[in-house]
Amino acid sequence: MKSIMTLVDFSGLTDQVVKTAADIASASKAKLIFLHVASPEADYEGRKMRANVSREGVASEMVGYLRAMQAIEADCRAAGIDATAILVRGTSVRGNPTPKILKEINRIKPDLIVVGSHGHGRVYEALLGSVSSAVVHKATCPVVVVPARKRVPRGK
């Protein structure tokens, strides 16, 4: 295995996803590529409404993502892992990163993808979609899905 792409969304699951990917990369001596898709034109980032949609607010948010990606890369490099962080601009006005993620997967052609799953359930996924589900179904390489530690029981 030469390269592992890890999808970073800066949710509460990010640390687990990064650790899983780093463990696999360390064991296999693979290059680790972290990818985050930021959509500065969207009023939503992921499924959350932006707190500050002003030009300054969005610019500050983008700088924050860049610094966070650089920190993830630096931590992995300090642990002896060949890592690269990539922050790309999304094209969805609704903040949906999936089309850009799939485009980057096809461009980079990793040997493995690591992605988190928030475990929202089928109804949520049917209404709003799921990045992990789209990646699993459309990627041409194996995908490791890191589940959220706490699952929300049905009906609650």
Image (spheres, rainbow, N blue to C red):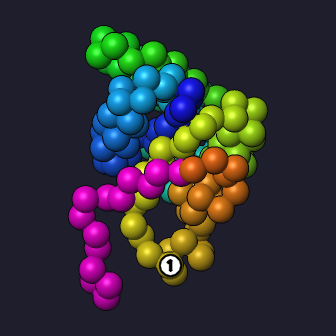
Can you name the residue that lies furthest to the bottom here?
155
Q: Quick check: is 12 in the magenta stretch?
A: no
Check the picture and name the quadrant holding the C terminus: bottom left
Q: Quick check: is 146 in the magenta stretch?
A: yes
Residue 120 occupies quadrant: bottom left
* Residue visible at 34% across and 48% down in the picture: 13
Q: Which element is circle 1 on?
A: helix
Above or below residue 65? Residue 122 is below
Above or below residue 108? Residue 100 is below
Residue 81 occupies quadrant: top left
* Residue visible at 36% across and 26% down in the picture: 26
Check the picture and name the quadrant holding the N terminus: top right
**Which span of residues is magenta-colored?**
143-156
Q: Nearer the viewer, residue 95 or 49?
A: 95
Query: What x and y, as percent, mark residue 97?
Result: 63, 47
Above or below residue 10? Residue 145 is below
Query: What x and y, as percent, mark residue 68?
Result: 40, 24
Which residue is labeled 1 in the image? 122
* Residue visible at 59% across and 76% down in the picture: 126
